[in-house]
């Protein structure tokens, strides 16, 4: 199913169409009612290392992370949601500099919506190009696999004659 497809083909005749991308993001497996996490807990939730989390903060990819009275980082659910989004941006292949730029725009407020949109649209175009390249590559692989499957069957038929 592509990003632009909907679930209409799988719905009952009277059901409404919904965009599968409009569903809320999957939540981290967080304890109910908890909104403060240590860096090790965030590393476990996100799959990122503590070193990467500290680096994200240092380069400005994450906003200021609260600290406990002992100086230990205390991440919130909002921070985890942001890290989840950053993970999606990483999957797109967006350069770190662009991710940092996007984070700066978010912190600058609503007046930056046009700039944020352009950055995301540019990334989307890049993703669509990569998807097309991967689909072409997949078609080549499928042809090769089919060729070798046909060749293997023909060889088996020759040996059984």
Image (cartoon, grey):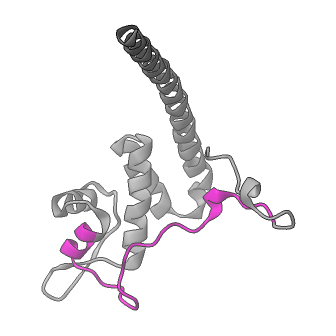
Looking at this view, is 58 or 42 the one in front?
42
Q: Note whether 107 is above or below 37 in the view shown.
A: above
Asked if the magenta segment contains residue 118, the reply would be no
Question: In the depicted view, which residue is nearer to us: 106 or 40?
Answer: 40
**Vertical arrangement, residue 161 with respect to residue 71, above or below:** above
**In the image, residue 87 lies at what x, y percent?**
38, 55
The quarter of the displayed image where residue 47 is located: bottom left
Q: Is residue 81 left or right of residue 24?
A: left
* Count of labels in the image: 0
Q: Is residue 43 magenta?
A: yes
> Is 130 on the left or on the right of 50, as rendered?
right
Residue furthest to the left = 70
- Percent x, y for residue 72? 16, 79
Residue at (51% x, 37% y) in the render: 127
Magenta-tinted stretch: 16-44
What residue is shown at x 20% (from left), y 86% (from top)? Answer: 68
Image location of residue 89, percent across then percent down? 43, 50
**Residue 73 vs residue 84: left or right?**
left
Q: Position of residue 31 (x, y in %)?
A: 35, 86
Q: Residue furthest front?
A: 161
The front one of 21 and 11 is: 11
Q: Residue at x 12, y 86 (%)?
A: 70
Q: Main secondary structure of the magenta part?
A: loop
Furthest residue toward bottom: 33
Would residue 68 appear left or right of 142 to someone viewing this image?
Answer: left
In this picture, is 92 found above or below 66? Answer: above
Please state, as top left, top right, bottom left or bottom right, where the C terminus lies in the image: top left
Locate residue 52: give its quadrant.
Answer: bottom left
């Amino acid at each position: 199913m592509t990003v632009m497809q909907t679930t209409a083909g799988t719905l009952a005749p009277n059901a409404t169409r919904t965009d599968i991308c409009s569903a809320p993001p999957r939540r981290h497996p967080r304890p109910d009612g908890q909104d403060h996490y240590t860096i090790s807990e965030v590393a476990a939730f996100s799959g990122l290392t503590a070193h990467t989390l500290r680096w994200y903060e240092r380069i400005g990819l994450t906003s200021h992370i609260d600290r406990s009275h002992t100086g230990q980082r205390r991440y919130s659910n909002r921070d985890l949601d942001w890290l989840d989004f950053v993970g999606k941006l990483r999957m797109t292949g967006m350069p770190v500099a662009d991710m940092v730029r996007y984070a700066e725009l978010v912190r600058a407020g609503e007046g930056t919506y046009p700039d944020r949109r352009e950055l995301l649209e540019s990334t989307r175009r890049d993703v669509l190009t990569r998807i097309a390249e991967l689909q072409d590559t997949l078609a080549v692989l499928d042809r090769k696999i089919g060729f070798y499957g046909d060749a293997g069957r023909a060889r088996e038929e020759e040996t059984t004659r």
